[in-house]
Image: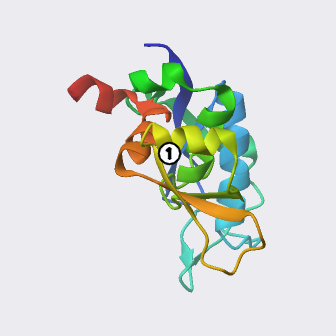
């Protein structure tokens, strides 16, 4: 299996949190951590040189720089190239895009959605219905003429999830 995204663990002296980020290099991971750590906490300038809670909020001492962020590789959380189900070999690129989009694969929480709306006579969607990947077309009367929703079937959800990268530690125990 080929690594899809490298995992890094980052920590900073002004917070006790560690972050898991995905990047190509440690420098890119450090920059992502700086942005996330600075956005996640309320930045306050303090004369103290030690990090800690201030009224329940974290503060940032101006003596620290982004170079103080410690970055370590976390190979156990690497994302590996996806292994799509065999049925994906018979799908077009557009159909794969539709299945992935229907499942919300491009979001931070894949699986949060299960539908795709378009014209009721879309040939790609009708073929996905024939393959039992999608169900539909459904029109509840709220959409304009000719518009419909197609819903991922349980098999369609499995197909969509197979298109996602897998974590290395999950792959080792599967």
Q: How many marks?
A: 1
What percent of the width, then of the height, locates residue 79? 48, 30
Q: Which residue is located at x 61 percent, y 71 percent?
A: 139
Nearer to us in this view, 169 or 109: 109
Label 1 neighbour load within 10 Å: few <14, some 14-19, many 20+: some
For the C terminus, the quadrant is top left
The residue positioned farthest toward the left in the image shown: 173
Q: Which residue is located at x 53 percent, y 61 percent?
A: 113
What percent of the width, then of the height, locates residue 96? 59, 34
Q: How is the image coloured?
A: rainbow
For the N terminus, the quadrant is top left
Residue 49 can be seen, yes or no: no
Q: Quadrant of residue 22?
A: top right
Q: Is 74 displayed left or right of 94 in the figure?
A: left
Q: Which residue is located at x 37 percent, y 29 percent?
A: 76
The residue positioned farthest toward the top in the image shown: 1
What percent of the width, then of the height, locates residue 170? 30, 33
Residue under numbered circle 1: 129
Decide: is 70 above or below 137. above
Which element carries disc 1, helix, strand or loop? helix
Nearer to us in this view, 11 or 145: 145
Q: Quadrant of residue 42?
A: bottom right
What percent of the width, then of the height, locates residue 29? 65, 36
Nearer to us in this view, 77 or 37: 77
């Amino acid at each position: 299996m080929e690594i899809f995204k490298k995992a890094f663990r980052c920590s900073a002296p002004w917070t006790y949190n560690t972050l898991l980020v995905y990047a190509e290099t440690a420098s890119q991971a450090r920059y992502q951590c700086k942005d996330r750590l600075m956005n996640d906490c309320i930045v306050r300038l303090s004369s103290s040189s030690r990090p800690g809670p201030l009224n329940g909020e974290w503060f940032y001492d101006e003596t620290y720089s982004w170079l103080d962020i410690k970055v370590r590789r976390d190979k156990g959380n690497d994302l590996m190239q996806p292994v799509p189900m065999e049925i994906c070999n018979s799908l077009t690129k557009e159909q794969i895009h539709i299945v992935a989009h229907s499942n919300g694969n491009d979001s931070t929480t894949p699986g949060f959605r299960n539908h795709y709306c378009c014209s009721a006579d879309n040939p790609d969607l009708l073929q996905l219905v024939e393959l039992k990947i999608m169900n539909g077309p459904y029109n509840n009367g709220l959409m304009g003429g000719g518009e419909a929703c197609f819903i991922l079937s349980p098999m369609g959800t499995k197909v969509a999830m197979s298109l996602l990268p897998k974590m290395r530690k999950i792959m080792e125990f599967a």
